[in-house]
């Protein structure tokens, strides 16, 4: 096992990786930008070094600075977390050139999967079912129109080098294709430096279901079951759960076998996720492989009892998997809600400000993966994800009840968050019935723009806790006199009202 690992990331994932390292007796090295100098992930590691800069480009995306810090700190390996440089093959190669082990797949595997068209070609050759479309970039809107006419509308234009919904446009009719092509290409060029697009047939109301895989350096590959990720906005996941309400034992075995087959086809190692679209008839199609640890990995950990960060470290250190497919069993049901600094009532627009109060849920079956604390400044420089609330229970109805209870205890004051949305979702009859697809929000979510009563109540409760300094367990601070936001005004009036 490694003696010391550099964690090339920030926020909740850096804290999560640091905890996993500590449990295996591995010392950790952290990095931080100027705004993150006092952030929780800096205190979660054994030693931390400044990267300087404010934006991601000036700090966490500086491969040369990360490698220099790792060498200066005498680290053996680098864990990239997710985002930033996690799926950058050049960074993985630079780590190896600097005498460091990159905790992730090989650069060759990342390159094969980084191009969506190349990945489609590989998967098709390996016998993995692929959504009808092109295996190469299309030359322009005219060619895209011709191909769309052959396979039928609706179609999806996607960035060859993309991910996360950037550079993607859904087109329902031929008249809209040229404009959508220009917009998608421009967005892809801006986000990835590559404006090339490919085309897929758009499945109508599919589910987004993904399979977790583990692969060691000795040829062993296993899957850890599936996660349901269909509740999304702008192709970004909001809620994940395991197992999927739509997947039975037979379908699970078939999807898992295909995911393992895909991993073997590209010589994949370490942790990865094979993502599929699942139609109403039970047919599934390859979407992409995420060559890293996923945001939603905790739900798989809770139902399988397997620590994915531990496995990442062991595999990267050259150890064999300590179990086979027959040893893996899923128990109970887990749900994860992503708590982000976004305003659900305003099209999930990012929210900024200073965190004034935090009360996190506790109790049986509740897990918080976060790096959120009072006084923290939330800016537009980084991803708006603040924390992840994960619950486990014996079955899905019990997990839903536990999540509703936990969300009812969760208070964050100072920025708008997605907590009110998650409360709404857990009460929605269609969600409770497991009737999900990737267009769920478009059909069901229609906020009126006004704060619901519970949000106002939460602001008042948090302000009362703050004003009376009820103790460190609530991790609250007194509101500053210059705070004049909508929530703080409501909270102050509530706090001053006679009982």
Image (cartoon, rainbow, N blue to C red):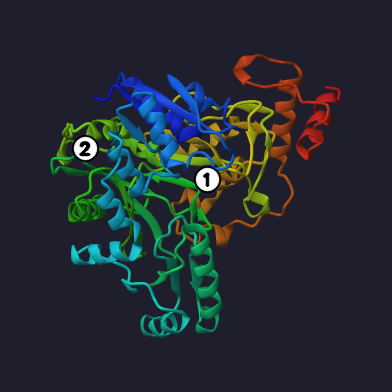
Q: Is residue 346 above or below residue 305?
A: below
Q: Secondary structure at mark 1?
A: loop
Query: Where does the image place residue 328, in percent across and percent down from the top left?
Result: 21, 37
For the point 43% across and 69% down, which residue is it? 196
From the viewer's side, name the closer residue of 68 and 194: 68
Q: Secondary structure at mark 2?
A: loop
Q: Is residue 225 above or below residue 312?
A: below
Which residue was labeled with disc 1? Answer: 57
410 left or right, relative to 200: right
Is there a contact, CB below 8 Å, between mark 1 and mark 2? Answer: no
Q: Quadrant of residue 423?
A: top right
Query: Where does the image place residue 429, in percent across and percent down from the top left?
Result: 53, 51
Query: Where does the image place residue 379, in percent across and percent down from the top left?
Result: 64, 40
From the viewer's side, name the closer residue of 428 and 343: 343
Q: Quadrant of residue 271?
A: top left
C-alpha separation, residue under disc 1 versus residue under disc 2: 40 Å
From the viewer's side, name the closer residue of 397 and 130: 130
Q: What crowding class fits label 1: few (fewer than 14 Cα within 10 Å), some (14-19), or many (20 or more)?
A: few
Residue 109, disc:
none
For the point 41% across and 83% down, which residue is it? 143
For the point 50% across and 58% down, which residue is it? 191
Which residue was labeled with disc 2? Answer: 328
Query: Where does the image place residue 168, in percent across and percent down from the top left?
Result: 48, 65
Q: Earlier in the sequence, mark 1 or mark 2?
A: 1
421 left or right, relative to 399: right
Q: What crowding class fits label 2: few (fewer than 14 Cα within 10 Å), some (14-19), or many (20 or more)?
A: some
Image quadrant where one finds the N terminus: top left
């Amino acid at each position: 096992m490694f003696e010391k690992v550099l964690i090339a990331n920030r926020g909740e994932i850096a804290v999560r990786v640091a905890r996993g390292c500590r449990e295996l007796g591995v010392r950790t090295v952290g990095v931080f930008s100027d705004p993150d100098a006092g952030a929780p992930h800096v205190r979660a590691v054994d030693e931390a070094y400044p990267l300087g800069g404010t934006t991601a480009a000036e700090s966490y995306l500086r491969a040369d600075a990360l490698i220099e810090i790792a060498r200066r700190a005498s680290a053996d390996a680098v864990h990239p977390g997710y985002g930033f440089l996690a799926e950058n093959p050049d960074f993985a190669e630079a780590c190896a050139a600097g005498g460091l082990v990159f905790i992730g797949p090989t650069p060759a595997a990342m390159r094969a999967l980084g191009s969506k068209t190349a990945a489609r070609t590989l998967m098709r050759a390996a016998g993995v079912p692929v959504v009808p479309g092109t295996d190469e970039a299309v030359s322009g809107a005219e060619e895209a129109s011709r191909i769309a006419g052959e396979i039928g509308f609706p179609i999806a234009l996607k960035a060859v080098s993309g991910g996360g919904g950037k550079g993607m446009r859904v087109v329902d009719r031929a008249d809209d294709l040229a404009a959508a092509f220009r917009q998608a290409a421009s967005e892809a060029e801006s986000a990835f430096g590559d404006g090339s697009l490919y085309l897929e047939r758009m499945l109508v109301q599919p589910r987004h279901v993904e399979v977790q895989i583990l692969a060691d350096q000795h040829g062993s590959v296993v899957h850890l079951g599936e996660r349901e990720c269909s509740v999304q906005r702008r192709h970004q996941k909001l809620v994940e759960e395991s197992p999927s309400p739509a997947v039975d034992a037979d379908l699970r075995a078939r999807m898992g076998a295909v995911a393992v087959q895909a991993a073997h086809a590209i010589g994949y190692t370490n942790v990865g996720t094979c993502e599929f679209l699942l139609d109403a008839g039970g047919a599934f199609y390859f979407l992409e492989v995420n060559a890293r640890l996923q945001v939603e990995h905790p739900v798989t950990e809770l139902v399988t009892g397997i620590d994915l960060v531990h496995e990442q470290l062991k595999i990267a250190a050259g150890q064999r998997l300590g179990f086979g497919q027959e040893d893996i069993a899923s128990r109970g049901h887990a749900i994860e809600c992503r708590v982000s600094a976004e305003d659900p009532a305003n099209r999930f627009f990012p929210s900024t400000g200073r965190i004034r109060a935090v009360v996190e849920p506790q109790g049986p079956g509740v897990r918080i993966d976060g790096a959120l604390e009072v006084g923290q400044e939330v800016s537009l420089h980084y991803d708006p994800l603040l924390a992840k609330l994960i619950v486990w229970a014996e079955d899905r109805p019990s997990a839903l009840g536990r999540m509703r209870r936990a969300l009812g205890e969760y208070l964050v004051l100072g920025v708008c968050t997605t907590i009110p949305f998650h409360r709404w979702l857990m009460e929605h009859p269609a969600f409770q019935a497991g009737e999900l697809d990737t267009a769920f929000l478009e059909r069901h979510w229609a906020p009126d723009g006004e704060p619901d009563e519970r949000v106002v109540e939460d602001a008042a409760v948090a302000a009362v806790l703050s004003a009376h300094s009820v103790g460190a367990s609530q991790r609250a601070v007194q509101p500053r006199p210059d705070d004049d936001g909508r929530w703080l005004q409501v909270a102050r009036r509530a706090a001053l009202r006679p009982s």
